[in-house]
Image (cartoon, helix red, strand yellow):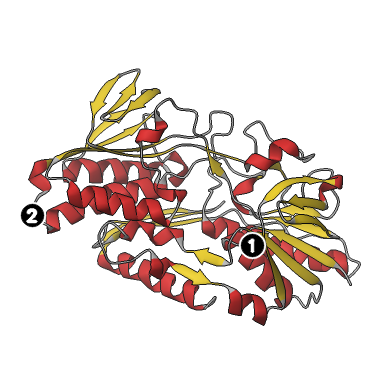
């Protein structure tokens, strides 16, 4: 029987499994990841406000794996060799006919003093720590910012930082203590969030002005201290620092024989094939893909890539040439706790809808829909 190995158990990995089975692929599938839970990270933004708990964002995958007849190997990948189809882990070696790398990315932690910042998308525990720290502050300055991978400008995750910024502002207002805090948004770019489109950038900066949020833009970061953000354009004193650094590929790529982009991601084509590695595929944040310069690193794009990869694997197994390219598409609701700003971008359209309560509830409704599909 054909063996398929999927590295990871996040959005891209789970969509790959679901789409393979929908396409009628009855191969033996092994999922390799350190945990058999889905952590729904898009909702970490709501942990500081207490409308979500960390435990509530963890979905056991045992039933989903059983339903889709998938074997889970609880292990960490150490390297991928043998043309990409030999996976070495801390629990042994796995050989497969097809390998789908859906292992996600990691944050670049080279900025001196980065240990003084909380990196929200590192996981649920960080979101819980943000709540604890915020609850413990009587007042002061909260600095929120993000950066990118200088060798691969698309390798960033800025959307959640806009959300944390606006959600914290709204929360402090609801608590009646916004006047005791200064919020500062910092970014090396003069117009942060450019991948969302010009109208979105104008809207986000306008929203900051409306809320009395200060900005520190266009200055390269130098270092972080326990109580300050140092840039080439000055110093931001801060009692709490939330910072999202740029992304690069998993650490184990350094020991592997896979082709890498300048930014340390796995080089792939529009069909999600790893270059020069037959029957090896990459989906989601771990890959470097062709496409527009705004191609996002987000769960929705990972799902679209996973669907394309699954259809292409099904084609190969049926003796056909793979031909399904993933769709470049950005869909983002920038949540503000009591409303949301909708941003949509494709090869044809770039739509920005102003903040209304409906978008906040749409985001919460989608969360429920998505999580139920794996429970």
Dot 2 crowding, Cα within 10 Å, few <14, some 14–19, many 20+:
few
Disc 1 and disc 2 in contact, CB within 8 angstroms: no
Q: Which residue is the extreme one toward the bottom?
A: 67
The image shows residue 115, relative to residue 355, as above or below, that is: above
Q: Could you say where residue 317 lies in the image, as x and y percent from the top left?
A: 87, 68
Quick one: label 1 or label 2, which is nearer the N terminus? Answer: 1
The image shows residue 353, relative to residue 295, as above or below, that is: below
Query: In 3D space, how far apart are the residues under numbered discs 1 and 2 (Cα atoms)?
Result: 43 Å
Residue placed under numbered mark 1 in the picture: 13
Residue placed under numbered mark 2 in the picture: 176
Which residue is pictured at 80% across the width and 68% down the height? 314
Q: Would residue 28 appear left or right of 10 to someone viewing this image?
A: right
Q: Would residue 2 appear left or right of 52 to someone viewing this image?
A: right
The image shows residue 340, relative to residue 179, as above or below, that is: below
Q: Nearer the viewer, residue 301 or 7?
A: 7
Q: Could you say where residue 179 lies in the image, as x and y percent from the top left?
A: 8, 44
Q: Secondary structure at mark 1?
A: helix
Can residue 334 be seen here? The reply is no
Q: Nearer the viewer, residue 189 or 84?
A: 84
Which residue is pictured at 71% across the width and 60% down the height? 6
Q: Secondary structure at mark 2?
A: loop
Q: Could you say where residue 366 lies in the image, as x and y percent from the top left?
A: 43, 71
Q: Could you say where residue 358 lies in the image, as x and y percent from the top left?
A: 30, 69
């Amino acid at each position: 029987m054909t063996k398929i190995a999927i590295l990871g158990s996040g959005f891209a990995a789970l969509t790959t499994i679901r789409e393979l089975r929908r396409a009628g692929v009855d191969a033996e599938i092994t999922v390799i990841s350190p945990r058999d839970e889905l952590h729904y990270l898009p909702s970490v933004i709501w942990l500081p406000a207490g409308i979500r708990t960390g435990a509530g964002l963890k979905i056991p995958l045992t039933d989903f794996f059983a339903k889709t007849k998938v074997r889970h190997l609880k292990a960490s990948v150490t390297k991928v060799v043998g043309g990409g189809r030999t996976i070495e882990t801390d629990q042994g070696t796995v050989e497969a006919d097809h390998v789908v790398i859906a292992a996600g990315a990691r944050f670049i932690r080279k900025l001196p003093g980065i240990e003084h910042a909380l990196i929200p998308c590192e996981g649920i525990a960080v979101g819980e720590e943000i709540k604890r720290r915020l609850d413990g502050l009587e007042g002061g300055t909260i600095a929120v910012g993000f950066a990118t991978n200088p060798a691969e400008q698309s390798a960033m995750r800025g959307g959640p930082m806009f959300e944390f910024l606006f959600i914290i502002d709204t929360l402090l207002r609801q608590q009646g203590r916004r006047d005791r805090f200064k919020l500062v948004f910092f970014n090396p770019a003069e117009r942060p969030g450019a991948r969302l489109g010009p109208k979105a950038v104008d809207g986000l900066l306008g929203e900051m002005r409306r809320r009395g949020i200060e900005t520190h833009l266009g200055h390269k970061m130098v270092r972080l201290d326990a109580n300050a953000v140092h840039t080439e354009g000055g110093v931001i004193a801060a009692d709490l620092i939330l910072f999202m650094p740029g992304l690069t590929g998993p650490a184990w790529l350094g020991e592997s024989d896979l082709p890498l982009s300048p930014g340390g991601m796995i080089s792939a084509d529009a069909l999600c094939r790893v270059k020069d590695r037959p029957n090896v595929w990459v989906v989601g944040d771990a890959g470097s893909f062709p496409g527009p310069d705004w191609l996002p690193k987000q769960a929705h794009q990972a799902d679209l890539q996973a669907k394309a990869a699954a259809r292409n694997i099904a084609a190969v197994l049926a003796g056909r040439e793979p031909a399904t390219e993933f769709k470049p598409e950005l869909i983002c609701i920038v949540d503000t706790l009591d409303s949301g700003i909708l941003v949509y971008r494709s090869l044809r359209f770039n739509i920005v809808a102003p903040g209304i309560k409906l978008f906040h509830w749409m985001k919460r409704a989608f969360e429920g829909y998505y999580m139920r599909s794996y429970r």
